[in-house]
Image: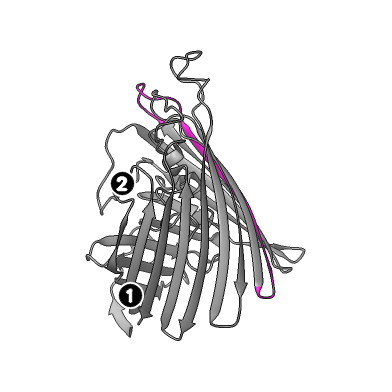
C-alpha cells in the first residue's frame, strides 16, 4: 500500500537546503512458505533434515525533493522476526551523482558478487557455506559511505562507476551518533565499474581492500571479481571469477580440515558460470556451477609439512532452479549439491531441495 504526500520537516543543516518538503511514503511486504529437505555425508549437524519455514518481510520507504532540486530517499527493511534487515539513506545530487549511507544494504558489493543469471537464488544458496565470491565486500557494506557518479554513454554502452569507503571494515551497524571502536580491521576501500552494452552484453569488475590494525594477524585483506553476462532473447549466459586473499590468522588449514573465509589464512579463487532460459513470460529455468579453490599458502612456519605442502582443495557447487509467477504469487524451487563441503577433502557432499511459495503486497 502507498501513503502519499505526507508532510515531513527536513532539518537539513547538513544538506544546505532547508524548509519542509512533501515526501511520498510507501509500505511494502512479502509473505511466503518454504519446504526444504537435505541429505548427504558431511560432518555438519544439519546434514540431514526437512521442514516447513516462513519467509515474511516488511519494508518502509520514503522519498522527496529538496528546495535545491536534489532528492532524498530512505528505506528500512525488517525480517520475519521483526529484526533489522537493512537501512539506508540516499542523496541524489543531480549532475554530482548520488551518495548512499546505510547498513545491510549491500553497499556496492551487492552489484558485483554472484552476478550470474538464475531463475531463483545464487548457486551457493542451500550450500554448506557461502562461496568466497559472495564475501568479497561483505564486511564493508555496514557503516560506510558509497558514491555513484553519473553514468557515461559511449558507443552504445553505458559506463557506471562505484566508489566506497568504510572507516571500520568489520560489518558493524552504527545507529545515529554511533562509532566503531578499536578492532582488528581498519578502513575498507572499494571500487567497481559496470559496462552495459545495447547488444545485451554486460561486463563488471570490482575490488575491495581492507586494512589490518593488529599485529597478531597477517596482512591486509584484498578481494576482486569480474563477470560477463550476455542476454539474447529468452536465453542468458554468464561467467564470473574472483580472487580473495583473506589476510587472516597465522594458523593454516590442512586439506582434510574445514576452512572458513575470513578466519583461515590463504587464498580463495572462485570460477562459476550459469545459463538461464525464459520459457515464457511466467516460467524460467536455470543451471549454475561453481568451483571455489582454497590454497592454504605458506604461513608462519613456511617450509613445514603443514604449510606450503598443503594441497589445494576445490569445493564444487551445482544448482538447477525454476520459477513460475502468477501476478503477485510465485512458486520457486531449486536442487543444490555441494561437494568437498567447506573446502575439506573429506568434507563429503550435501544435497538440498527447496520449494517456496511467495506472496507480495
The residue at which mark 2 appears reads as 172
Mark in the foreground, 2 or 1: 1
- The image's mark for residue 32 is 1
Picture quarter with the C terminus: bottom left
Q: Residues within 10 Å of mark 2 (few under 14, many from 20)?
A: some
Seen in the image, is 19 located left or right of residue 278?
left
* Residue positioned 43% across, 43% down in the render: 348
Q: Position of residue 286 (x, y in %)?
A: 57, 67
What range is drawn magenta here?
A: 212-234
Picture quarter with the N terminus: bottom left
Can residue 117 be seen in this snapshot? no
Can residue 247 be seen in this snapshot? yes
Q: Position of residue 125 (x, y in %)?
A: 43, 57
The earlier-in-sequence mark between 2 and 1 is: 1
In front of the other: 52 or 133 = 52
* Residue positioned 69% across, 75% down in the render: 233
Disc 2, SS: loop
Whether 345 is drawn above or below 270: the answer is above
* Residue positioned 66% across, 71% down in the render: 235
Amino acid at each position: 500500500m502507498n501513503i502519499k504526500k505526507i508532510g515531513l520537516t527536513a532539518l537539513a543543516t547538513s544538506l544546505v537546503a532547508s524548509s519542509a518538503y512533501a515526501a511520498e511514503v510507501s509500505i511494502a511486504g512479502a509473505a511466503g512458505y518454504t519446504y526444504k529437505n537435505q541429505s548427504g555425508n558431511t560432518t555438519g549437524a544439519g546434514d540431514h533434515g526437512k521442514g516447513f519455514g516462513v519467509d515474511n518481510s516488511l519494508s518502509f520507504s520514503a522519498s522527496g525533493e529538496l528546495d535545491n532540486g536534489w532528492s532524498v530517499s530512505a528505506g528500512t527493511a525488517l525480517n520475519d522476526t521483526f529484526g533489522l534487515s537493512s537501512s539506508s539513506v540516499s542523496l541524489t545530487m543531480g549532475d554530482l551523482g548520488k551518495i548512499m549511507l546505510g547498513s545491510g544494504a549491500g553497499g556496492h558489493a551487492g552489484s558485483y558478487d554472484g552476478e550470474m543469471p538464475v531463475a531463483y537464488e545464487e548457486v551457493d544458496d542451500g550450500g554448506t557455506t557461502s562461496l568466497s565470491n559472495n564475501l568479497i565486500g561483505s564486511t564493508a557494506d555496514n557503516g560506510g559511505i558509497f558514491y555513484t557518479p553519473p553514468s557515461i554513454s559511449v558507443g552504445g554502452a553505458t559506463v557506471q562507476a562505484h566508489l566506497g569507503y568504510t572507516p571500520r571494515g568489520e560489518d558493524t551497524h552504527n545507529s545515529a551518533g554511533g562509532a566503531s571502536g578499536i578492532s582488528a580491521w581498519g578502513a575498507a576501500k572499494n571500487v567497481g565499474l559496470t559496462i552495459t552494452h545495447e547488444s545485451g552484453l554486460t561486463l563488471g569488475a570490482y575490488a575491495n581492500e581492507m586494512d589490518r590494525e593488529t599485529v597478531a594477524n597477517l596482512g591486509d585483506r584484498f578481494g576482486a571479481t569480474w563477470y560477463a553476462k550476455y542476454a539474447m532473447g529468452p536465453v542468458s549466459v554468464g561467467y564470473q571469477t574472483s580472487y580473495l586473499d583473506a589476510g587472516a590468522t597465522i594458523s593454516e588449514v590442512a586439506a582434510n580440515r574445514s576452512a572458513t573465509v575470513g578466519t583461515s589464512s590463504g587464498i580463495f579463487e572462485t570460477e562459476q558460470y550459469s545459463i538461464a532460459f525464459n520459457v515464457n513470460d511466467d516460467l524460467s529455468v536455470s543451471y549454475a556451477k561453481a568451483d571455489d579453490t582454497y590454497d592454504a599458502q605458506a604461513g608462519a612456519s613456511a617450509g613445514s609439512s603443514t604449510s606450503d605442502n598443503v594441497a589445494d582443495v576445490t569445493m564444487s557447487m551445482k544448482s538447477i532452479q525454476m520459477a513460475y509467477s502468477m501476478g503477485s504469487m510465485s512458486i520457486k524451487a531449486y536442487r543444490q549439491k555441494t561437494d568437498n563441503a567447506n573446502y575439506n577433502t573429506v568434507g563429503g557432499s550435501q544435497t538440498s531441495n527447496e520449494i517456496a511459495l511467495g506472496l507480495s503486497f
